[in-house]
Structure formats: C-alpha cells, structure tokens
Image: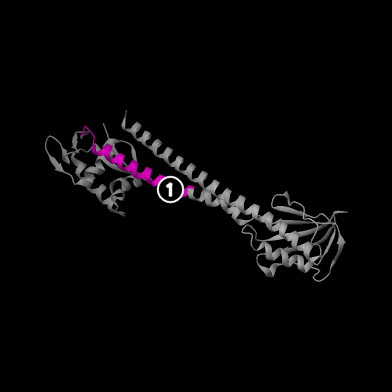
Amino acid sequence: MSDSQNLFSGKRKYLFLLALLSFILVIFATFSMADKDDFNIARREVLLRKIGHELLLQSGDSVSRVLPVKKIAENEYQISFEKEFSFQPDSLANTTRRLLANDPLTSDYVVNVINCGNSDVAYGYAISKNRKEDNIPCIGRIQPKACYVINIKFKQKVIDKAKNGYLFAGLPFLALVGFLFLKSGTTRKRKTLLDSKDTNTFTLGSVLFDAKNRKLITNEKTIDLTGTETRLLLIFALSPNETIERGRLQKEIWEDEGVIVGRSLDMFISKLRKKLELDSNINIVVIRGKGYKLEIRS
C-alpha cells in the first residue's frame, strides 16, 4: 500500500471514530433530556389538575370531579370539569401563577376560560415570567356560574429550542478537535514521508542535490546547505516546475515547529537562489499572488 493510501486510510479511521463518538454523545444526551422532559410534562399535568381542584374549592364545590387533563395542541392543555361553577378572575390568576411557578418548563402562558355552550372566551389573561408584562383584565368581577373549560397555552420553552442547540453545539467542537487531530496526524505523516525517502538525491539540471548530507554538488564544486535550506529545497525538488503555495512553505518549514514567520521565507529563498547559481538553468521564481516554483529549464 502506498504512503498516500496509508494516509487516506488513517484519515478514514479518525473520521469514523469521531462520527461514532458524536453519535454516542447525541444519543446519550437525547435520551437523558427526553427522560427529564417526560417527567416534567407529567408533573405539569398534575399541577394543571390541581389548578382545577383549587378553582372548584374557591367556588364552594368540594365534591364534583376535575376531569382528566387533555393535551389539545402542542404546548396547550385543557382542564375540564364535571359540573358548572363560578369563578373570580383574580383568584384564578393567582392560583395559576402560584402553582405553575413550580413547573420548570413554564415561562410565559395564556389562559382562556371557554364557555362550553357556545365556545366563546368568557375570560382570558396572560402571565409572563416578567410580572411587569402580565395582562390580567377584569380583576374583581365574579364570572357567573356556567359550564367552563380552561385552556392554558404555554410559550414554547426556550429549553425546548435550546435542547437541540446544546446537543449539537458540541458537534462543531468535536469536529474541530477531530480536524486538529487529523491535521496533526497529516503533518506528522507528511514529515515522515519527507524524512524517510529511500532516495535522498535529486538531479536538478547539472546539479546533484544530496538531501541527506545537505549538499549541492557539481563536477567542479560542492556547496553546503543549512537544515532549513535543505527542507525548503526538498519540497521544491519533490515537485519541480510546479507552483508551491507560500502558505504551505511557511507551514511545513516553520509553523509546524511552533514558530510563526514573517519575512524569513523570502530571506531563505534568496539565499537558496544564490546557491543554485551553480547552474543557470535552474532557479526559484516568484509566482505572484501564489508562491514559488523551482524552474528547471532543459
């Protein structure tokens, strides 16, 4: 298997592990939050039933039943009763506010008291988490005895919207970690490829480039290269007559070593050009806006 195939295979393994970890995290968080929400919803229905119970007591009825609470729409519930009753708006508002304060899923909600006979809204009000925004009309006006149902519509809880955000907000972080891990692995593999070449000599025109011993050799002269010059020329020698991006050179020569460079690259390119003057047919040329190219004229 070639080096590039090994590198690709390694990437696939890392990506598979990252995807598996992300999937497990999402599944675990989803079930955990779903269980918690199911409990809170069941508790909310108990609180709604208690609202009905206290409302009947306030009307002087301690005998008739509060019928099962119904979920009539998303985030909307209905409390119904066995018999007719009368109610006082401020007492109903205070009761719902007091009891639903214990509901962790509740922030804002609207209460409508519906007349069973004609489906008209006999009374309604809005409660907000910020009490200054409460809207409770007709305080002190007792409503006549009749058949009523109470519909309570809850504002979609922020936690419901945020839940998916919390679940998936971790995924970009995992992706970033995975990317950095892959990047690090790719860099190490690239360095290994450069450092472990069986052939460390390259023919550049009439010049022999001995990467292992850091030398440029002709029949008449031998010139020593520094370690940085050798790594730089090796990148060019592996891709003669091809444009090498400036960013890649900076990264592979310096940034991967933890050093950020400014004009250092230009300085080493200039020094390398002078040493390559052994043969006038080879030169490192600037590709404006892109990078450099080791040009070898035949």
Q: Nearer the viewer, residue 267 or 24?
A: 24
Residue in the picture at 26% in, 40% down? 283
Helix, strand or loop under label 1: helix
Label 1 crowd (10 A; few <14 / some 14-19 / many >=20): few
Q: Is residue 182 magenta?
A: yes
Q: Which residue is mark 1?
A: 176
Taking the spot 71% from the left edge, 63% from the top edge, the residue there is: 96
Q: Quadrant of the C terminus?
A: top left
The residue that appears at 51% across and 51% down in the rendered structure is: 169
What kind of residue is marked 1? Answer: Leu
Colour convention of the picture: one colour
Identify the image quadrant of residue 4. Answer: top left
> Is 286 situated left or right of 131 in this image?
left
Instruction: State the predominant SS element of the stretch in magenta.
Output: helix
- Residue 259 magenta-highlighted: no
- Outermost residue, bottom side: 140
Question: 151 or 182: nearer the eye?
Answer: 151
Q: Position of residue 282 (x, y in %)?
A: 24, 38
Q: Position of residue 112 (x, y in %)?
A: 78, 59
Q: Is residue 192 left or right of residue 122?
A: left
Image quadrant where one finds the N terminus = top left
When asked about the image quadrant of residue 238, the answer is: top left
The location of residue 92, given as percent across then percent down, is 76, 65
Q: Position of residue 250 (x, y in %)?
A: 31, 48
Residue drawn 12% across the image and 39% down it: 221
Q: Is residue 26 left or right of residue 187?
A: right
Most extreme residue toward the front, as rendered? Answer: 63
Residue 179 vertical position relative to residue 52 in the rendered view, above or below: above
Work out which residue is located at the far left of the displayed protein and give it.
Answer: 220
Does residue 287 appear left or right of residue 175 in this picture?
left
Residue range corresponding to the magenta coloring: 171-199
